[in-house]
Image (tube, helix red, strand yellow):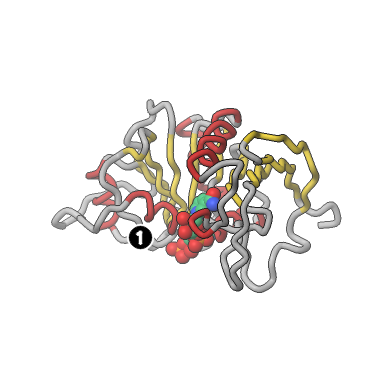
């Protein structure tokens, strides 16, 4: 079964992905904004957070450290800690993220990997105590990998926290059930900047439909624009 996926993004009214570039506000600062995001994340009651390769690499901050070969590794899965209470999931087709241990922010790491990741990388993850699921076919079907995560770890609800490319890809493939855009009183307004959802040059028209669930005022001048996401009715 596919877990329920709620996307949670802190953004400005002009859709900016980068709080470090925003205007200041008398209503609050980045510390206040991030506290509010933490509160919304808690209310979503998810057992796992999930991010793309770029975002996970920024947080994991590891360097390559594969053990000496030969490598005897488990494929397609390695379940290092099924009893963890909370999880952080990385979508990392090429096996490019390096970790400093089995957990990040106290949450057990699960890497979703592409078919062609080398044994040396899997050996590194296993030595770190990181769990992984490797795709068995060349098409990297995140839904299939998440069904394994659901079955093996009992994860039923996931909060998807970007970045833009990951949000776009998962919305396009119909995996996202709900959006929570936490809009802060700030603007970026640089030309050509990153927005919170991106999908190549075609975008998402015709691939997903949103309908408003709620608009909550959150304090510090922030609102949560909460939308249900579904496949287009004529698809
Ligand atoms: N404002 C916020 O709340 C917020 C939250 C999170 C992140 N951020 C910021 O967002 C920036 C990163 O965003 P980003 O869009 O560049 O990167 P990203 O979404 O973190 O990672 C993108 C990569 O993830 C992999 N990926 C994700 N979904 C995939 C799919 N369905 N199929 C195949 N591969 C998939 C691809 O990796 P490969 O190219 O290796 O295949 C892709 O290039 C960072 O600066 C971060 O600080 C902001």
Ligand 1 neighbours mark 1 (CB distance < 8 Å): yes
Question: Furthest-left residue in view?
Answer: 68
Which of the pair 225/136 is nearer the observer?
225
Left or right: 64, with 196 as reference point: left
Quarter of the image with the N terminus is top right
- In the rendered view, tell whether residue 91 sits above or below residue 227: below
Q: Residue at x 62, y 53 (%)?
A: 186
Residue 16, x across and y down, in percent: 60, 58
Question: Furthest-right residue in view?
Answer: 234
Left or right: 52, with 106 as reference point: right
Residue 66 in sight in this render: yes
Left or right: 154, with 203 as reference point: left
Which of the pair 29/166 is nearer the observer?
29
Quarter of the image with the C terminus is bottom right
Q: Residue at x 38, y 45 (%)?
A: 132
Tell me the residue that label 1 is attached to: 96
Residue 83, x across and y down, in percent: 38, 26
- In the rendered view, tell whether residue 92 sits above or below residue 108: below
Q: Residues within 10 Å of mark 1 (few under 14, many from 20)?
A: some
Question: Furthest-front residue in view?
Answer: 26
């Amino acid at each position: 079964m596919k877990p329920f996926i709620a996307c949670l993004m802190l953004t400005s009214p002009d859709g900016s992905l980068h709080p470090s570039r925003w205007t200041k506000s008398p209503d609050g600062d980045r510390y206040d904004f991030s506290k509010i995001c933490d509160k919304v994340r808690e209310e979503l009651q998810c057992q796992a957070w999930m991010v793309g390769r770029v975002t996970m690499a920024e947080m994991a901050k590891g360097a390559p450290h594969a053990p000496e070969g030969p490598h005897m590794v488990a494929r397609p899965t390695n379940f290092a800690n099924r009893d963890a209470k909370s999880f952080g999931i990385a979508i990392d087709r090429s096996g490019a993220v390096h970790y400093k241990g089995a957990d990040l922010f106290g949450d057990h790491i699960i890497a979703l990997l592409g078919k062609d990741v080398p044994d040396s990388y899997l050996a590194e993850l296993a030595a770190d105590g990181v769990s992984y699921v490797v795709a068995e076919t060349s098409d990297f079907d995140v839904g299939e990998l998440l069904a394994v995560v659901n079955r093996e770890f009992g994860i039923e609800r996931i909060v998807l926290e970007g970045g833009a490319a990951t949000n776009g890809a998962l919305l396009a493939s119909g995996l996202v059930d709900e959006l929570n855009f936490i809009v802060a009183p700030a603007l970026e307004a640089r030309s050509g900047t990153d927005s919170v959802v991106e999908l190549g040059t075609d975008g998402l028209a015709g691939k997903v439909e949103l309908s408003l669930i709620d608009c909550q005022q959150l304090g510090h001048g922030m609102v949560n624009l909460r939308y249900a996401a579904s496949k287009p009715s004529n698809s």
